[in-house]
Image (cartoon, rainbow, N blue to C red):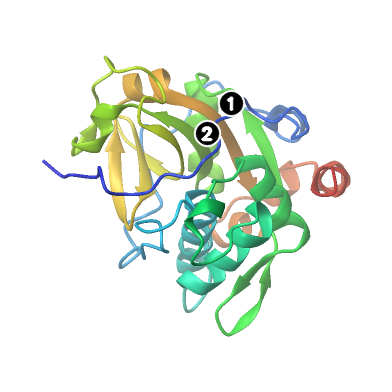
């Protein structure tokens, strides 16, 4: 079995941020979603983004989303580096490189607001700015599947149990939520077994029962560029309302 016990976490545990509106405000969720979704197979490899040394998982997850999106939408993917991710983590959390006492983690919602306002610096390019985020109820599996299938990913906060340190597939549900700590991962697909996420530079399968036991917050990330590139009509989303809401959220 894989030993993840030395890996870093870094998500400050929190309920979903009420300032981020629900996805249903902008798009209707159909009663069913595809049986599976795979928005990860084209990605050649996932960088660690310093999450084996620093509790920057909330920002590493953003780096993985940017790499994933651009793999499917651009001629060349934007592969984030440690420096850009750590700079964002420092800006959001106050982390001072080299000072472990300042490595306290961050709130998922704070990272999303930073991404929407300041943008994530990218290697050899301008900042990547998130168009919008919308909250999901973590146990509404139909909405979760629909969001992953449509928008490519869902940005999530999970309360990792101790059992997750040694499982190749996150499946055991006997340990208490958060007995290891808080973690942030993007879901980049799902199958009959459950969601597939990116963590610590690799893909990780979890079961649906595990997700229901340990998920605490989930946000759909909305990008018109992604929808156009994947053949979905972005006109079905209330973009004007979304942008107005996100302007308020980003500066809350």
Q: Contact, CB < 8 Å: mark 1 with mark 2?
A: yes
Q: Is residue 34 left or right of residue 168?
A: right
Looking at the picture, how far across and down is residue 69, in whole percent? Answer: 51, 61
* C-alpha separation, residue under disc 1 versus residue under disc 2: 8 Å
Residue drawn at 18 percent across, 39 percent down: 168
The answer to whether 192 is drawn above or below residue 68 in the figure is: above
Viewer-closest of 79 and 33:
79
Identify the image quadrant of the C terminus.
top right
> Mark 1 = which residue?
30
Residue drawn at 51 percent across, 38 percent down: 156
Whether residue 75 is visible here, answered yes or no, is yes
Q: Secondary structure at mark 2?
A: helix
Identify the image quadrant of the N terminus.
top left
Looking at the picture, how far across and down is residue 250, in whole percent? Answer: 80, 49
Viewer-closest of 137 and 57:
57
Viewer-closest of 51 and 249:
51
Q: Which mark is residue 59?
A: none
> Mark 2 = which residue?
146
């Amino acid at each position: 079995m894989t030993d993840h016990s030395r890996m870093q976490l870094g998500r400050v545990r929190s309920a979903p941020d009420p300032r981020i509106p629900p996805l249903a405000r902008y798009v209707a969720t159909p009663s069913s979603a595809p049986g599976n979704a795979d928005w990860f197979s084209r990605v050649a490899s996932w960088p660690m983004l310093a999450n084996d040394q620093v509790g920057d998982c909330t920002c590493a997850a953003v780096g993985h989303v940017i790499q994933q999106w651009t793999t499917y939408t651009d001629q060349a993917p934007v592969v984030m580096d440690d420096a850009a991710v750590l700079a964002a983590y420092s800006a959001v959390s106050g982390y001072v490189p080299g000072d472990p006492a300042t490595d306290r983690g961050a709130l998922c919602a704070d990272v999303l607001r930073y991404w929407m306002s300041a943008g994530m610096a990218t290697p050899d390019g301008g900042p990547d700015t998130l168009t919008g985020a919308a909250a999901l109820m973590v146990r509404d599996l139909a909405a979760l599947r629909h969001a992953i299938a449509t928008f490519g990913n869902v940005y999530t906060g999970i309360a990792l149990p101790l059992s997750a340190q040694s499982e190749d597939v996150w499946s055991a549900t006997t340990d208490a939520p958060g007995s290891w700590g808080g973690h942030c991962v993007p879901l980049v697909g799902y199958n009959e077994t459950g969601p597939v996420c990116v963590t610590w530079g690799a893909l990780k399968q979890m079961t649906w029962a595990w997700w229901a036991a340990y998920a605490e917050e989930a946000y759909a990330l909305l990008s018109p560029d992604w929808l156009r590139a994947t053949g979905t009509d972005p006109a079905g989303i209330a973009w004007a309302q979304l942008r107005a809401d996100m302007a308020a959220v980003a500066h809350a």
